[in-house]
Image (cartoon, grey):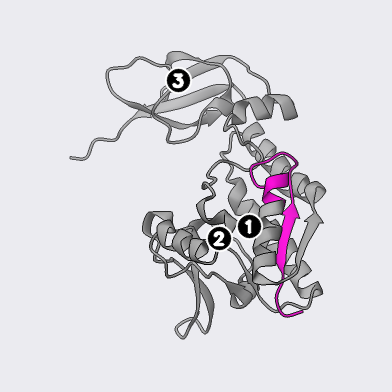
Amino acid sequence: MELSGTTLELFAGSSCCNKDTYIDAKNVCKSLEIPHFTYDYKEEFRNHIINDFINCYANSITPNPCIECNKYMKFGIMYEKAKELGCKYIATGHYAKTEYSKEYKMWVLKKSNAGAKDQSYVLWSIPKEIIEYVLFPLADFESKDEIRKIASENNLKTANKPDSEDICFIPDGNYKKFLEENSDIKPKAGNIVNSKGEILGKHSGLYNYTIGQRKGLGVSYKEPLFVLGFNKEKNEVIVRRRKRVI
């Protein structure tokens, strides 16, 4: 098979796994006169992505599910499925670029020309051995408007489809609610302390905070405070002031 379109079912009801998404993908493939396939990988997605997301928060680590999804699903399972279909390459809509490096004597991942929209940073974990077989058609475009114009000129119904920037399995953006409803993680009050152990305030759960966070700490202090880390055993959020540069 020379060319085909593929949609992975990963999480029912998510921003990228719903009836409209499947219909849109099929319509685009129909316009391009290529076959479209849909595969159910919801169990694998839960095992590799959702469980990792939950485990990270349970251990006071801030996860990045997009990185894990790219590694295991889009450039793992999907690449293997593409080979089964007889396809040599896979192409996605990420803003990134691949090219052969004479210096490193291998194919490498590079930034695209999309500036702030570049997504190469969430692709660093894809298997190096498949980079040669990954195509990023959007690599040289600087804005989404250019891409929408091309889609519109080709009468694709998805030309004006809104961007989705939320975590796909948490479309309402409320990750705290998701954790409480899908894991044993529940609100547990504790102290917010400085590096000396002095109590500055209270928190309602370690999972409500991220290292480096400044806003929404719930602590009134003479200077801005940032989350430095956590003491899971004592259920403490550790904060500090910004370092002064002399």
- Residue 85, how many percent across, how many down? 79, 73
Disc 1 packing (10 Å; few <14; some 14–19; many ≥20) = many
Which mark, residue 113?
none
Real-space CA distance between mark 3 and mark 1, rounded to the nearest whole angstrom: 37 Å
Q: Residue at x 66, y 54 (%)?
A: 24
Q: Nearer the viewer, residue 53 or 99?
A: 99
- In this rendering, position of residue 244 left or right of residue 78: left
Q: Nearer the viewer, mark 3 or mark 1?
A: 1
**Residue placed under numbered mark 1 in the picture:** 70
- In this rendering, position of residue 230 left or right of residue 89: left
Tell me: residue 42, above or below residue 140: above
Res. 139 in view: yes
Which mark, residue 123?
2
Q: Nearer the viewer, residue 202 or 122?
A: 122
Asked whether disc 2 touches disc 1, contact meaning CB atoms under 8 Å apart, the reply is yes
Q: Nearer the viewer, mark 2 or mark 3?
A: 2
**Residue placed under numbered mark 3 in the picture:** 193
Q: Amino acid at mark 3?
A: Val
The reply to whether the magenta stretch includes residue 49 is: no
